Amino acid sequence: QKEVEQNSGPLSVPEGAIASLNCTYSDRGSQSFFWYRQYSGKSPELIMSIYSNGDKEDGRFTAQLNKASQYVSLLIRDSQPSDSATYLCAEHYGQNFVFGPGTRLSVLP
Amino acid sequence: EAGVTQFPSHSVIEKGQTVTLRCDPISGHDNLYWYRRVMGKEIKFLLHFVKESKQDESGMPNNRFLAERTGGTYSTLKVQPAELEDSGVYFCASSQAQGGVAFFGQGTRLTVV
C-alpha cells in the first residue's frame, strides 16, 4: 500500500485556467504537509506548506487540507506555461518526509 | 544565503566501483536528509541525520550504502561497490526544525554502467 498517492497525470490545462492537484495519504497522525514543484532535471522546490485543516493561500496557489478525509490539494489559479512541472505532495511522518510519485502538469498556451 | 549544495552533479561509474556523494546543508540546519529517485519511481527516503547522529536510516537499501556526517556539518553518502540498480538521482535536503520545511539540493545524477 502506497503511503502518499497522487495521480501521475499528465494533467493538461489551458493557460489561465485553474489547475487542481490532489493527494491522499495514510492517516498516521501526520501533522505537516508540503507541496513541492520539480522542473525536469532540477531539484524539488517548496511551493506551500500546510499544517491545519482548511485553506492556505499564497499568491496564485491555494493549499487545502482535510485531515478527516485524508487528502491535501493544491489549486493553481491563472495557470501559466511556466507552471508546467511535476508537483510532489509530501507528508512529514515520524522522522522523515514521505513523497508521493508526483503529478505532471502541463499548461498549454 | 547559500542553499543546499551537492557534489558532483553527475557521476558515471562502472559496476563494482565506489562513488562518494557530498551534501552541504544550509548553515545552521541540524536536520539533513538523503533521498533517492530511481527512474519512474517516487522519491524515496534513505536516512536522516540530526547533527552528526543518524536519527533514522530505515530507508538505506543495503550495506553497500554508508552515510556519514562528521562534525554535524556536511554529509557524504558512499556506495561501495556500486550496482546497476543504484542508478538514479540522489537528493539531499536540510531543515532547521524537525517537521519544518525541507530545502533540497540540486541532486546528484548517478549512472552505473
Image (spheres, rainbow, N blue to C red):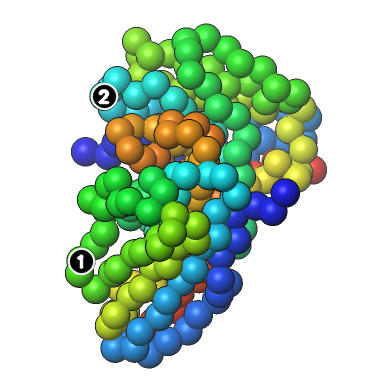
Residue type at numbered disc 2:
Arg
Chain letter of the residue carrying label 2: A
Residue visible at 55% across and 27% down in the picture: A49
Query: Looking at the rendering, which quadrant does residue A97 occupy?
Result: top left
Residue B18 placement, left or right of B11: left
Residue visible at 46% across and 71% down in the picture: B21
The label shown at residue A28 is: 2
**Is residue B82 visible from the viewing direction of this image?**
yes
For residue B60, above or below residue A4: below
Residue at image mark 1: B62
Give the image location of residue B97, x and y in percent.
48, 34
Query: Looking at the rendering, which quadrant does residue B41 occupy?
Result: bottom left
Q: Are marks 2 and 1 in contact (CB under 8 Å)?
A: no
- Mark 2 vs mark 1, CA separation in Å: 26 Å
Please state which of residues B81 and A74 is positioned toward the viewer in this rendering: B81
Residue type at numbered disc 1:
Asn
**Is residue B39 visible from the viewing direction of this image?**
no
Give the image location of residue A72, x and y in percent.
46, 23
For residue A78, above or below residue B73: above
Give the image location of residue B26, x and y in percent.
59, 50
Could you say whether the residue bearing mark 2 is in a helix, strand or loop? Answer: loop
Residue A54 placement, left or right of B71: right
Could you say whether the residue bearing mark 1 is in a helix, strand or loop? Answer: loop
